[in-house]
Image (cartoon, coloured by chain):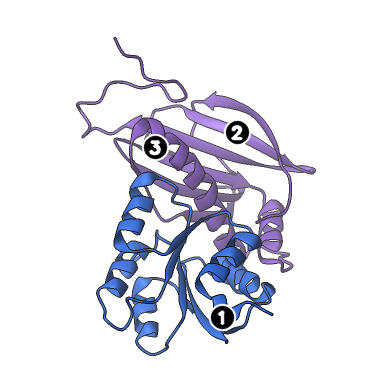
């Protein structure tokens, strides 16, 4: 089963790296959408159905925690797994993400293997046979 | 993410603010009970190399993509420093990085505190990471604390 993934990060470099890593996993990913902040992400989620969101925390306009809270408060978005991909390693931010319902957490700098593991956790149908 | 090994030098303490007369310098703010600045400086060639390694593209001149890669690198390096400092200083916030590229420029920090400096060698070039932290004025109840050492109790 092919899956769609949304990558949210204010850094175009990180979006590009994640695009490349996601393609390299060999998993069945149909579309990789990109957003530069939480607001853009919510707009996109209103138009496109995705199976997983990978989001940074520190972003302008609307950060990753605000995006997570908004998604958990929306009936049509709350079941989409949200994985935080961030430099934030402090207990406060990670704890808040977990409390808000984050499905997982990957700390930057990340390896392709770490991203692949998260994909396998949340997109089991996309694992190549 | 860079897929390369860099060689760290000794940590030194310097009083002057970072100066990069030519090259790339990236600043990021830290705020909490202590506040300050972290920065990464490197040559334009090193900035292009970082970008090329991170994005697996060939960057030959400093452009928006290179500056974006340096901003993210700064975010990751100082973000790691922040996480380590939080065990002693409590929760800290991290600002969005600002990257400057130019020639014959100077930077000046309004802080009078010392900078902790570590240089890293990457083959025949090097980059520098600097952090400067001081107690926030609003945290009047906090005891003075020396970075890198555990607080003393009576």
- Residue furthest front in the image: A129
Chain identifier of the residue bearing label 2 in the image: B
Chain identifier of the residue bearing label 1 in the image: A
Query: Could you classify mark 3 by the number of other residues whose Cα lies within 10 Å: few (under 14), some (14-19), or many (20 or more)?
Result: many
Q: Colour of chain A?
A: blue
Tag in front: 2 or 1: 1
Above or below residue A8? Residue A32 is below
Please give the residue where the numbered disc 2 appears in the rendered image.
B118
Horizontal placement of A110 versus B17: left or right? Answer: right
Above or below residue B1? Residue A66 is below
- Residue furthest bottom in the image: A47
Q: Position of residue B26 (x, y in %)?
A: 52, 50
- Residue furthest top in the image: B154
Residue at 33% in and 80% down:
A77
Instruction: Note whether residue A112 is visible.
Output: yes
Disc 2 from disc 3: Cα separation? 19 Å
Above or below residue A4? Residue B89 is above
Residue nearest the observer in this picture, A18 or B57: A18
Tag in front: 2 or 3: 3
Q: Colour of chain B?
A: purple
Q: Position of residue A95 (x, y in %)?
A: 34, 51
Tag in front: 3 or 1: 1
Disc 2 from disc 1: Cα separation? 46 Å
**Would you say the residues marked 2 and 1 are in contact, meaning their CB atoms lie under 8 Å apart?**
no
In which quarter of the view is residue A109 placed? bottom right
Disc 3, SS: helix
Please give the residue where the numbered disc 3 appears in the rendered image.
B86
Please give the residue where the numbered disc 1 appears in the rendered image.
A125
Q: Earlier in the sequence, mark 2 or mark 3?
A: 3
Which image quadrant: the N terminus of chain B?
bottom right
Q: Position of residue B58 (x, y in %)?
A: 74, 67
């Amino acid at each position: 089963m092919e899956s769609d993934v949304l990558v949210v990060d204010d850094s175009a470099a990180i979006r590009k790296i994640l695009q490349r890593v996601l393609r390299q996993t060999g998993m069945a990913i149909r579309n990789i959408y990109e957003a530069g902040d939480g607001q853009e992400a919510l707009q996109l989620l209103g138009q496109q159905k995705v199976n997983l969101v990978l989001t940074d925390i520190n972003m302008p306009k609307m950060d990753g925690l605000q995006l997570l809270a908004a998604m958990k408060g929306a009936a049509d978005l709350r079941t989409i797994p949200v994985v935080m991909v961030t430099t934030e390693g402090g207990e406060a931010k990670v704890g808040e993400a977990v409390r808000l319902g984050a499905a997982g957490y990957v700390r930057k700098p990340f390896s392709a293997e770490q991203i692949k593991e998260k994909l396998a956790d949340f997109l089991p149908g996309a694992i190549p046979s | 993410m860079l897929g390369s090994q860099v060689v760290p030098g000794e940590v030194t303490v310097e009083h002057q603010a970072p100066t990069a007369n030519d090259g790339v310098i990236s600043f990021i703010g830290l705020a909490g009970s202590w506040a300050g600045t972290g920065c990464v400086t490197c040559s334009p060639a090193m900035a292009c190399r970082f970008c090329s390694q991170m994005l697996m593209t060939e960057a030959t001149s400093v452009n928006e993509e290179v500056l974006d890669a340096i901003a993210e690198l700064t975010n990751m390096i100082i973000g790691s420093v922040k996480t380590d400092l939080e065990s002693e200083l409590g929760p800290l916030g991290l600002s969005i990085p600002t990257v400057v590229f130019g020639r014959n420029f100077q930077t000046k920090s309004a802080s009078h505190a010392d900078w902790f400096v570590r240089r890293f060698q990457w083959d025949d070039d090097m980059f520098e990471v600097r952090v400067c932290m001081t107690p926030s004025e609003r945290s009047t109840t906090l005891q003075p604390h020396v970075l890198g050492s555990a607080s003393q109790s009576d």
